[in-house]
Amino acid sequence: MLRSRRKFLKYATISAGLTLAGGFYWLNTSRRRAGRLFRQILADSKRRIIPAPVVPEPASWNDNAITLAWLGHATVLINFYGIRILTDPILGSSAGVSLGFTTIGTKRYIAPALPLSKLPSIDVILLSHAHMDHMDIFSLRRLRRAPLAITARRTSDVIEGTGLKKVVELGWGEQTRFKNERGELEVLAFEVKHWGERWPNDEPRGYNGYVLRCEGKSLIFGGDTAYTPLFADLKAKGPHDLAIMPIGAYDPWIWNHCTPEEAVRLADDAGAQYIVPVHHQTFRLSNEPMNEPIQRFTTALEAEKERIALRQIGDTFILPGA
């Protein structure tokens, strides 16, 4: 009996070792998404997150103006005549699966220009879709005091546990309003070219861009989008003073993310004067070099440099004549 037990333990140990070795070999060589993600997380664990090159000072912003600061990825802090808006807030160290105390996923390259503790009080949170780099549970739980969160159709269940006070879902062509003692903001959802499922084989979910209007001024938040003629439909709803446009993650995801040159075309199609380039420099989500999107974007606007609202994380832009 003793010999049989020892024999069993021996073969069980060998089997477990072979299984473990095979698992490590698969994770280190697999071309599947899970294998690539594991290797990236392992490499990221050794990398230091770089501080943002510029730190905005929203406490000094004038409530009688329109001021924006890019905090990283698709997160933009907007003071729209005293109404404070935050787009697709992701302000932790990673984009991925929230475990409550931390997030497991792709690590940032550059820290948020403002940490959650330094943000002013937020009135409106805009969520374009349910992807983890845009609908970040870690950040939303810490922004739960915001009076209103606006999101796409069939996405509010994802953020049920965050404690947000009020969540409004908008379909394409639908709008809502936010009003406080400083003014009234109108938010219109429009169709972009993307997709919205949070998980593989998840139920279909919505994905939006938004038009923001207040006191005769109009801003576009493009969310995530590939090139589409749909932006031309926005021109009749203008004029639009500024468009916040994604310019990264196009290689190889060109069917769902526009190139920098296409981002300029989309803003032109919509009739936007200034452009804020986002969705680059923060996370490695695709194959193009980290600095390629902003370089191509700058080249595309070489003859109209004045239209580039900002270039690096932390930069602040005050809309002229607002």
Image (tube, rainbow, N blue to C red):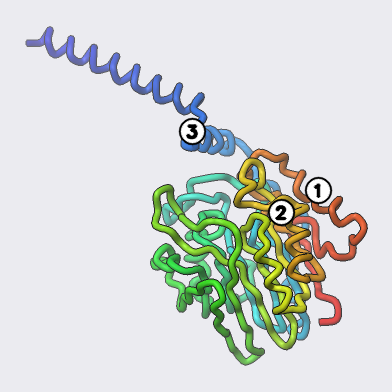
Towards the viewer: 127 or 41: 127
Q: Is residue 196 left or right of residue 306?
A: left
Q: Is residue 143 above or below residue 224?
A: below
Specify which label sits upstream in the sequence, 3 or 2.
3
Q: Dot 3 lies on which element?
A: loop
Residue for point 60% across, 63% down:
192
Q: Dot 1 lies on which element?
A: helix
- Residue 50 pos. (x, y %): 70, 47
Pointer 2 and pointer 1: residues touching (CB < 8 Å)?
A: yes
Question: What residue is shown with label 1?
Answer: 296
Q: Amino acid at mark 2?
A: Ile
Q: Is residue 256 left or right of residue 33?
A: right
- How far apart are the two marked residues, 3 and 1, measured between alpha carbons? 30 Å
Question: What residue is shown with label 2?
Answer: 247
Residue for point 76% across, 74% down:
67
Q: Dot 2 lies on which element?
A: loop
Q: Amino acid at mark 3?
A: Arg
Q: Which mark is residue 32?
A: 3
- Residue 83 pos. (x, y %): 65, 81
